Image (spheres, helix red, strand yellow):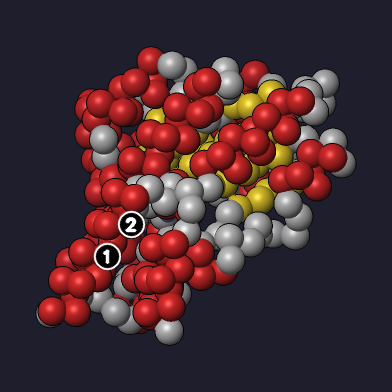
Amino acid sequence: MKQLLIWKKLTQPTRLEEYYQLLEFARDHGYMLTSLIDWYRHYRSKEHKVLILRHDVDVDPVGAAKMYALEKALGARATYYFRWRTIDTNLMHKMRQDGFEVALHYETLATYCKKQRIRKAAAIDAPILRQCFSKLVDEIKIFRQRFGEMSTIARHGDKRNRLLGIPNWVILSHGDRNLLGIEFEAYDPEIQQQFEAYISDSSITKGFAWQYGTTPEEAIKNDLSPICLLTHPEHWNFSLEKKLKSFVVDFCERLG
Ligand SMILES: [Zn+2]
């Protein structure tokens, strides 16, 4: 099974052209392509047709750079949520200069549990959640110092969260949210319920199927607005360089 997946990854052509065509399709149907914060601040009225481009940079900042270049070429803007491990300072500053939204994909609780070797939900009590909330306040401060102003955040879903059955956003209700200084968390219900369509990509193992009931093309053809489209660069960028890297990593893992 694993060999089959490696083979699939090695032979998978890049999907960036497909992403570009999707953006063109939306633009040709009268959609404005922009970031989450730009939509929230300026384009929430119904007179606008908006496709919100959100990217969670889970593992592939190189892919993020390529998607950003395509969006920029089309005069679009987007939101990029970076984990600490996918930070690319140069790229992030360039994005900000071009009016893109750059913000933190936080995973504070998962990181804490990995460090403390916590694998059971029962071991997580209110003091731990409060401690993680304070850590997130600090993370946001550091992120702002290094990469500039940030108005939203989005939680990352880590393997450890799935193991525990507790998502990272649980910590948000264990402290004074004003201390975060953000306008919203991308998964806040009052934000999500404003989307007429919320669509996410999926991985090669799921055949890249669109998730949550519709496809971007269908939503666009039906004039739904706003559409929030969440994509992960690693599901689109399949360069030779990346393939070789994953092949070497896998080979080394086998050598143990
Ligand atoms: Zn994520």
Label of residue 45 in the image: none
Identify which residue, 206 or 164, lies in the foreground: 206
Examine the rendering and report whether any part of residue 177 can be seen: no
Q: What is the distance, in whole Å, between disc 1 and disc 2 at their CAs?
A: 6 Å
Residue marked by disc 1: 247
Identify which residue, 86 or 184, lies in the foreground: 86
The quadrant holding residue 247 is bottom left
Q: Quadrant of the C terminus?
A: bottom left
| Residue type at the position of mark 1 | Phe
Q: Position of residue 164 (x, y in %)?
A: 39, 76
The quadrant holding residue 113 is bottom left
Pointer 2: residues within 10 angstroms few (<14), some, or many (20+)?
some
Q: Quadrant of the N terminus?
A: bottom left
Q: Is residue 129 above or below residue 140?
A: below
Pointer 1: residues within 10 angstroms few (<14), some, or many (20+)?
some
Q: Position of residue 232 (x, y in %)?
A: 47, 49
Q: Position of residue 182 (x, y in %)?
A: 44, 33
Q: Which image quarter has ligand 1?
A: bottom left
Q: Secondary structure at mark 1?
A: helix
Q: Is residue 3 above or below residue 93?
A: below
The outermost residue toward the left is 256
Q: Is residue 109 left or right of residue 54?
A: left
Identify which residue, 247 or 188, lies in the foreground: 247
The outermost residue toward the top is 97
Residue marked by disc 2: 243
Examine the rendering and report whether any part of residue 245 can be seen: yes
Whether ligand 1 has any atom under 8 Å from the Cβ at mark 2 is answered as: no
Which residue occupies 33% across, 57% down? 243
**Count of picture labels:** 2
| Residue type at the position of mark 2 | Lys
Which residue occupies 82% across, 21% down? 47
